[in-house]
Image (cartoon, rainbow, N blue to C red):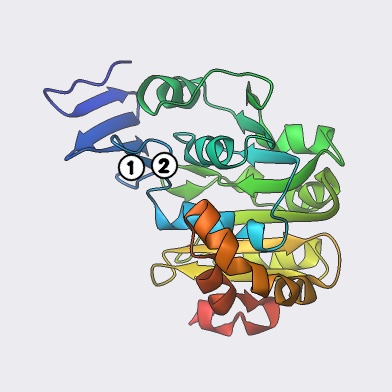
Amino acid sequence: MRLKFGKRRATDDGLEVTEERGLRTLHLGSRAIQSAMRVSRPWDLELAYTRAMMGFLMFNPMPQEVLMIGLGGGSLAKFIRRQRPQTRVTAVEIDPRVIAAARTHFELPPDDETLSVIEADGALYVRQHPGSADVILLDGFDAGNQVEALATQTFYAACRRALRPGGVLAVNLWGRDSEFAEYFARLTRAFDGEVGWLSVQYKTNVIVFGFTEPGAAARLDAARPRLDDLSKRYGLDLRGFARDFQWAANVAPLLE
């Protein structure tokens, strides 16, 4: 698959890469943007929801192992690799076309000692790798819809088992999905109520965070004095995320 710059579009059975005014985007079977890259700044996080997913840094600013389920254009993998070269990133993606597009059109580098891209079923991979990650970044969509296999009660429970002590799961959910309330409830059950969330762009995306251990609110309070420095270091508004962060008990605004 090649990007046809004259037509600004390349397609492959539902996978589409477009470019307009220096912004390159990935689509999977719908007009919904799965990934975006500013061609002049390929390492930046162009989409607001990806920046919000990096909110895990408020709870663990120095993860050693990050597991991504769903690759997209590889924005999060590239950002972490650039900003925290000490962190090892493993990205699991079931669709080989997505991997090819990330490498061909979105400047995802080849595998090395800090980056590994695996073509596999993310639901199966998580079950097979307990205690393997400090952070899991879950972004599983297909044709604009949540991948159901990556949103079941069993899968969320497997994500918790795949995390190490003190681990954090960050999930991108579609805030207007008719099943959103059920997905949120499943996450709350899987993590024994230790769940928080950030709303992005008027609930278009909701980033839900699950914590393996109690005391996440205290961890966030303890981190607040460091958030200005962390925000400058990573180019993220972590202080703003901390201000807007909500806990599971305050889910009512999401369901209105």
Would residue 130 appear left or right of 223 to someone viewing this image? right
* Element type where label 2 sits in the image: loop
Disc 1 and disc 2: Cα gap in Å?
Answer: 5 Å
80 versus 232 height, above or below = above
Q: Amino acid at mark 1?
A: Ser
What residue sits 42% from the left and 57% below the top?
A: 48
131 versus 237 height, above or below = above
**Residue 30: mark in rendering:** 1
- In the rendered structure, are the residues bearing label 1 and label 2 in contact, judged by CB atoms less than 8 Å apart? yes
What residue sits 58% from the left and 84% below the top?
A: 252
Instruction: Decide: few, some or many residues near mark 1? Use Cα within 10 Å; few <14, some 14-19, many ≥20.
Output: some
| Residue 224, horizontal then vertical, whole percent | 66, 74
| Residue 247, horizontal then vertical, whole percent | 67, 77
Residue at image mark 2: 143
Q: Amino acid at mark 2?
A: Ala
Would residue 50 appear left or right of 134 to someone viewing this image? left
Would residue 221 appear left or right of 237 to someone viewing this image? right
